[in-house]
Amino acid sequence: MNPEQDLAMAKTIAEKVAGAGGRAYFVGGFVRDRLMGHPCKDVDIEVHGISPDELRRILENCGELTQMGASFGIYGLRHYGIDIAMPRQEHATGKGHKDFSVSVDPWIGPRKAAMRRDFTVNAMMMDVLTGEVLDPFGGRADLQRRVLRHVSCERFGEDPLRVLRAAQFAARLEFTVAPETIALCRGMDLSRLAKERVWQETMKALLQARKPSVYFETLREMEQLSFWFKEAERLIGTEQDPLFHPEGDVWTHTMRVLDEAARLREKAREPAALMLAALCHDFGKPEISRVIEGRIRAFGHERAGLPAAEAFTRRLTDEKTVRRYVLNMTELHMRPGALCSQHAGEKAYMRLFDASVCPEDLLLLAQADRRGTGFGYDGEQDEALLSQKLEAYRMRMREEYVSPADLKKAGIAPGPVYTKALRYAHTLHLSGVPYKEALAQTLAFARRETRQEQFAGTGERSP
């Protein structure tokens, strides 16, 4: 979409609406971002003072009309990034995010129309033609103070998703949440929210905020971690050895790692999954941490955290590739640093990168983990070494290797021997054995395995 084109079309619509006796306003995040001097990606217009049929006629004369929610009075124009809505009233009919009755009322007036908005900074309206800002609830003052404050206690409390929206806005906009809004959020029930909506709000914080930790710290202050983020909540108060983690408990460390990962996410192959892995990487510490000889130890927390990481990711998403990524990263996140410390040989690095679903992102996670301690960062030398080892692995993987076609050409049909032979060939490839030699060794291995299977079937011992 072209922002200038969208704004030009918004003005055209507003002029036609004015000609019909109505008035068009920019609303929501558009006005907030415009006043903050931020780029305005989404253009939302609310049209007052004309009938739905008249608005539809105007829009059909402006372009190809698309119905985004016609029963709610929401329209769009094909090839334009504009949402055009009519004022509406919403009343809760249940406790879920979708349990609302909606009625369109073009003559309700700006103040009542704005009352259904979540926060005062999102309740401002700007006349499309004159630029006049209507601010019935003090949003401009809250914008200057960088405060998120709910518009209406009754209306805000009808939609539990607004708890997560408050947290993600606080993270993305770097605002604080008003104490009275925090108090209101504490009493709201999030359990009936759809996982897709929780995922959407969480991803906005993880992928767009400079400090995603603010999202979780805000939910902690609201006492709203317990249902959707219970595994993260368990990190609070789990102590660590101050010799290695002077920053404090596992929660504090994880929040720092999240913010460090945010600095690296543009380099990631899978930014969303990387951020989730940063959140989950130490989920095993509450389970495994022990005081041994006066020191706090968490030996094996990488594997111990896998059940918690799986439960957490399964609760938020049905994406199997995301779960696989997070579990893999959680299990391996300590290995890059350990290999550097141990001055490990080439084979160890080859095995590590081969076990990783995304070696590039694994190194980013390990870097964020190291930066998330209370020490000054001194890992540049290790980063350089790991980059060299990863490049060596990538070069090795580009070399000719024994393939399934090679085995089939040699008469080895798919089956147990075939599978074992491929694994054996891959091990030789990782070890740097040249192709011809690896092929000879693999075929010899397959012949041995075939003989053993044959003798196993007769009950005799292979010679």
Image: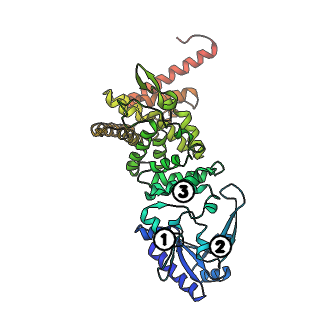
| Proximity of marks 1 and 2: CB atoms separated by less than 8 Å | no
Between marks 3 and 2 in the image, the one whose residue lies nearer the viewer? 3
State the residue lying farthest toward the bottom: 19
Which residue lies at the image location 54% right of the left edge and 53% below the top edge? 182
Q: Is residue 351 above or below residue 34?
A: above
User: Is any atom of residue 199 visible in this view?
Assistant: yes
Q: How many angstroms separate mark 1 from mark 3 (CA)?
A: 24 Å
Q: Secondary structure at mark 2?
A: loop
Q: Is residue 434 above or below residue 91?
A: above
Give the labeled residue for mark 2.
Answer: 73
Q: How many angstroms separate mark 1 from mark 2 (CA)?
A: 20 Å
User: Which mark, residue 157?
Assistant: none
Tag 3: residue type? Glu
Side of 58 where 325 appears, left or right: left
Q: Secondary structure at mark 3?
A: helix
Q: Residues within 10 Å of mark 2 (few under 14, many from 20)?
A: many
Along the viewing direction, whichever of 333 and 212 lies nearer the viewer: 212
Question: Which of the two labelled residues, at mark 3 and mark 2, occupies the earlier sequence position?
Answer: 2
Q: Where is residue 103 drawn, in percent x and y?
A: 70, 71
Tag 1: residue type? Val
Which residue lies at the image location 40% right of the left edge and 46% below the top edge? 261
Q: Where is residue 282 drawn, in percent x and y?
A: 47, 35
Rendering quarter of residue 44: bottom right
Give the labeled residue for mark 1.
Answer: 31
User: Is any atom of residue 422 visible in this view?
Assistant: no
Question: Which of the two labelled residues, at mark 1 and mark 3, occupies the earlier sequence position?
Answer: 1
Q: Secondary structure at mark 1?
A: helix
| Proximity of marks 1 and 3: CB atoms separated by less than 8 Å | no
Along the viewing direction, whichever of 428 and 111 lies nearer the viewer: 111
User: Which mark, residue 180?
Assistant: 3
Tag 2: residue type? Gly
